[in-house]
Image: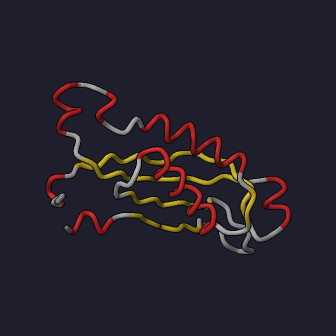
Amino acid sequence: MIKKNELDVIHVRDIKLWAHVGVLPHERLLGQKFLLDLSLWMDLDDASKSDDLSLTADYSLAVKGLQKLALEINCKTIENFSEQILDFLEDLYGVIPVKVFLKKCAPPIDGFDGFVGIERSRHLSILNK
């Protein structure tokens, strides 16, 4: 059993992604900028003591892999895009608690200059056991 206070968190912020995601055809044709934050919960004690990269999550693999995924994707919703991101991270790191915050930086909405974001997670229930 894993207790919440036994897990550490790796945060990776502001991963720049270019993806073909959007309801409008020109969004899927031309693509647009997204920013991604992710958090991975895991026990980092052994890695911190041994300085052994194999005992932690090599976040460079996530960044490079997600940049590649973003270039290949073509879908209508950021919900679907976030699902593919979660699938990728689970394939890479296994079943660990993970949270992502995906931001569409310039949604084509007249008179709106903010961003739209979606926050999703997987396996966070592990933290409560």
- Above/below status of 15 relative to 85: above
On screen, residue 27 versus residue 82, left or right, reads right
Question: Residue 121: horizontal and vertical position, in percent?
Answer: 42, 65
Residue lying at 43% horizontally and 38% vertically, measured from the top left:
59
- Above/below status of 66 relative to 58: below
- Above/below status of 119 relative to 59: below
Residue lying at 52% horizontally and 53% vertically, measured from the top left:
36
Viewer-closest of 90 and 119? 90
Question: Residue 75: horizontal and vertical position, in percent?
Answer: 73, 63
Residue lying at 47% horizontally and 34% vertically, measured from the top left:
60
Q: Quadrant of residue 49?
A: top left
Image quarter hosting the N terminus: bottom left
* Colour theme: secondary structure
Image quarter hosting the C terminus: bottom left
Question: Residue 61: horizontal and vertical position, in percent?
Answer: 49, 36
Viewer-closest of 60 and 56? 56
Q: How many numbered tags mark residues here?
A: 0
Residue lying at 56% horizontally and 60% vertically, measured from the top left:
103
Residue reaching furthest to the top? 51
